[in-house]
Image: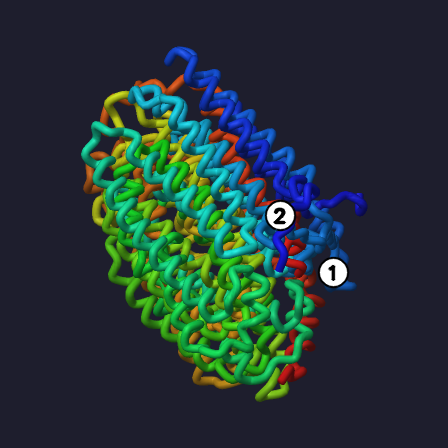
Amino acid sequence: MMIQFNPADLIAILPELVLLGATCAILLVDLFLKPAQRDITHWLSIATIALTAFFVWRGAPAVGEGVSAFNGMFLHDGISVVLKQFILLTSGLSLFYARNYMRDRALWIGELYLLILFATLGMMLLVSAGSLITAYLGLELLALSSYALVALNRDSAASAEAAIKYFVLGALASGLLLYGMSMIYGATGTLDLARISALIGQVEHPGWLAFGLVFMVAGIAFKMGAAPFHMWLPDVYHGAPTAITVFIGSAPKIAAFGLAYRLLEGALGPLSGQWTLMLAILAVLSLAVGNLFAIAQSNLKRMLAYSTISHVGFMLLGFVGGSPAGFSAAMFYIISYTMTATVAFGMIALLARAGFECEEIDDFKGLNQRSPWYAAIMGISMFSLAGVPPLFGFFAKLLVLKSAIDAGFLWLAIVAIIFAIIGIYYYLRVVKVMYFDAAADDAKIPLPADLPLRWVISLNGLALVVLGIAWGPLFDWCNRAFGV
Amino acid sequence: MAQWPLLSILIWLPIVGAVLVLALGRDPRVARWLSVLVALLTFAASLPLYFGYDAVAGGMQFGESHLWINGLKAYYGLGVDGISVALIVLTTFTSVLVIIGSWGPINKRVSQYMAAMLVLEGMLIGIFSATDALLFYVFFEAMLIPMFIIIGVWGGPRRVYATLKFFIYTFLGSIFMLIALIYLHMKTGEFSLAAFAAAPLSTTEQTWLFFGFLAGFAIKVPMWPVHTWLPDAHVEAPTGGSVILAAIMLKVGGYGFIRFSLPITPDASQEYAWVVIAMSLIAVVYIGYVALVQDDMKKLIAYSSVAHMAFVTLGIFISMALVREYANPDAARLGLQGAMVQMISHGFVSGAMFTCIGVLYDRLHTRMIDEYGGVMNVMPWFGGFFIFFSMANCGLPGTSGFVGEFMVILASFQSNPFIALVAAFTLIIGAAYTLWLVKRVIFGEVTNPKVAKFKDLDAREWIVLGSFAVAVLALGVYPKPLTDLMNSSVLQIVNALMLSKA
């Protein structure tokens, strides 16, 4: 195949180009700013994300008309548009949630913004990947930025430890993934995902495919944080500064969904009979490990980290069907999860102040007396994570359970709901300390005066209610992306 | 008037009112008045439902249907038949009394309490009017949140344990029901209850679905042996919470059996009616004896609720057996009618009993029976009410408690005299534990000096107990309006039961 450059392809990656250009500009601008002027970087970054989102929206292809650019390296279709919008949304949210927290800790530096923007660029590339190379490229851009973000607080031993763990295990995962990719490449002789999918039926050595598949599933599971490849996740979430946890706990999950979809369905779709079973096992293990270990946590960040693992398990229920409706449900689930998790992690960042992390569950004691409004927002987020209607999280659970049942995995759906019931307990415990317990310390602690932060987190929380009542349009959007 | 979306108004008025109460209710007096106003408006809005419902025509009326989720063909579908109308009016009526009743005892975070009550009211009306299974489920689960908060914040010493148990226990049951609903959606492609009822289902499918529904509704009712959350929740809940719980939330279980189990899985309901009937009979007798030995008044009434609700499940499932095995649709109608009357009656009676206990609790701050004694001497009016409601609780003719129990026993007799005999035990055991309670609390000498200082009912308590008393008496003396209201709806259900779906 001749490699040709078609200038029209640039239109397809316009949002990425905008993001890259603006990020480089911010890099330069930030060099000349005094620390007191960091707000300029802050708002420039948010404007960049908004602008990128605008171009994603403008350039969205018509329904069912995906475009592939750069000789199939880059896919520009409905799925990538939905995923990019929500990646940008959650990245933007985490910028809002980070400002106050990082400023209180003298970590409010330009690198924060640059790393988040580069990570966002990596994710956008990842979810548009049309070839193994682009997928890996996007993944590494995301991963390297994330390692540095976790280590941003250099003086904290916990952060450094978390960053090292993240780096070592992340590198291992990348290695597994890359090894799997090389086996697939060896078997099919192409890096192009669509061509791999087309050639799978006629390879000479099917054993290589199975070998590659196992390694790729392991690598993806590592990146998602599915048990038994979850060991890095609680330590990283716990050790990272809370504002960074908001980021790495949200947008990269959407990107991980994109990675899994592109590689498993896009490239290895014909092998779905094999990988659905692997994912079903991963789902059960994640549900069990996530929910059972979360009960024992007294640290809210760690608890939410285990809860993430269980939610990944839930999302995988959508994959086990291997059908477009299932992927659509899984995408809906991951969007719902990230929208909810940003509220939960964001609330920890909001209530923290200089010298007080507010990350123990007991730190939320009596929040309802101090601030009924934020207690209600946090309560909404917890009930949504627990999957209680009429909140967003319930409908996400409904859809993935439905897709699992439709696919004939009734036993898996029953296992999932049993763990969901167990999971309710630890979410309710947070509500319990907020509402039923008396505040442990002085009830007069002022809340941060950062108005944009307070507004954004309130809107984020209310969105969980609104999307719980009117989730139809989002569901339709996901369905259209997958052509359901 | 018919053009108004009356059911939507009934659901959303209290919920919007709750938001207003939260927003404006910084001053407890404002919160109290505003919430009473909202509750009264809702009650007033429910009256056109009762008067406007064409009981002769029957069927679903006041229908509203808007596409909610296109991808799943889920509708925001509302509609009521006679059964729903009765339960909705019960809900709006009781909510007014509960909110008035909470004026005195609730002193901290008044606006939040009132708002939670109003939200709960809206959700309960939503449950009774949903014709779409997904919408039903959403209300069914969502009502746990305000109740969780009510018990947990304003409850007694062991409130955290009780409220967690309440939430997780009831969630456990209903999530199995969710699986059943998803399965039915897979079969029919939509969520409407009518489509579920029309769908042909094999016997195996029906069996699984039946047990899925049973898990959800038996815990809500609650039936023996999954009743253990109820005494804990009742004992720890504030008075208003107990009243709502006993008077309305338990009815959701019985309503669910009528709306889901009977029409959707009739063959399995017939096959396994004996399970439910056996569980009900055990509850009548065994739970009755358990109630006898309680030394906490609220626990006693909580167990008596379990025993009384067993009549509801007995009436529902005996009618199943009557239709299919004895080909006696008239008796089946009697059983179903009895179950419904028992639900409404139990709503009034248990609500009143818990209010009475609340009145005593506000004065002495204990619910232990042996702390009281001789209350009649210092609170004659209250004593009169207490005795009256206790009589209704035993099922004395002339009170509402008699009508439902009598109809259910009469219906059971036509299927199997032995069942009727066991069920009739309640008349003895119920009288035993209730009258013994009256004897120990109301009569006798005043032994506790604090009891001697009790003041009789104030105007607010008078209004609440007086209203309950009127309702109990009216229903007991002349239940015809209620049975007429539900007659054609019950008839339709019975007719549908005759057809096999397998």
Closer to the camera, A313 or A28? A28
Residue at 64% across, 63% down? B191
Decide if residue A147 is on the left or right side of residue B177. left
**Residue furthest to the front:** A2
Q: Position of residue B404 (x, y in %)?
A: 53, 65
Q: Which residue is mark 2?
A: A474
Amino acid on which the number 1 mark rests in the picture: Ala
Q: Give SS at disc 2.
A: helix
Decide if residue B220 is on the left or right side of residue A20. left
Q: Position of residue A322 (x, y in %)?
A: 54, 67
Residue at 45% across, 78% down? A205
Q: Chain of mark 2?
A: A
Disc 2 to disc 1: CB gap under 8 Å: no
Q: Position of residue A361 (x, y in %)?
A: 28, 38
Q: Is residue A333 above or below residue B225?
A: above
Residue B400 shows in this picture: no
Residue B5 sits in quarter: top right
Q: Give SS at disc 1.
A: loop
**How dense is the environment of label 1, judged by Cα within 10 Å: few (below 14), some, or many (20 and up)?**
many
Decide if residue B78 is on the left or right side of residue B253. right
| Callout 2 and callout 1 share a chain | no
Residue at 52% across, 70% down? A405
Closer to the camera, B242 or A340? A340
Which quadrant of the figure contains the N terminus of chain B? top right
Q: Which residue is mark 1?
A: B55
Closer to the camera, B301 or A393? A393
Decide if residue A293 is on the left or right side of residue A208. left
**How dense is the environment of label 2, judged by Cα within 10 Å: few (below 14), some, or many (20 and up)?**
some
Amino acid on which the number 2 mark rests in the picture: Leu
Q: Chain of mark 1?
A: B
Q: Is residue B175 above or below residue A452?
A: below
Q: Position of residue B484 (x, y in %)?
A: 69, 62
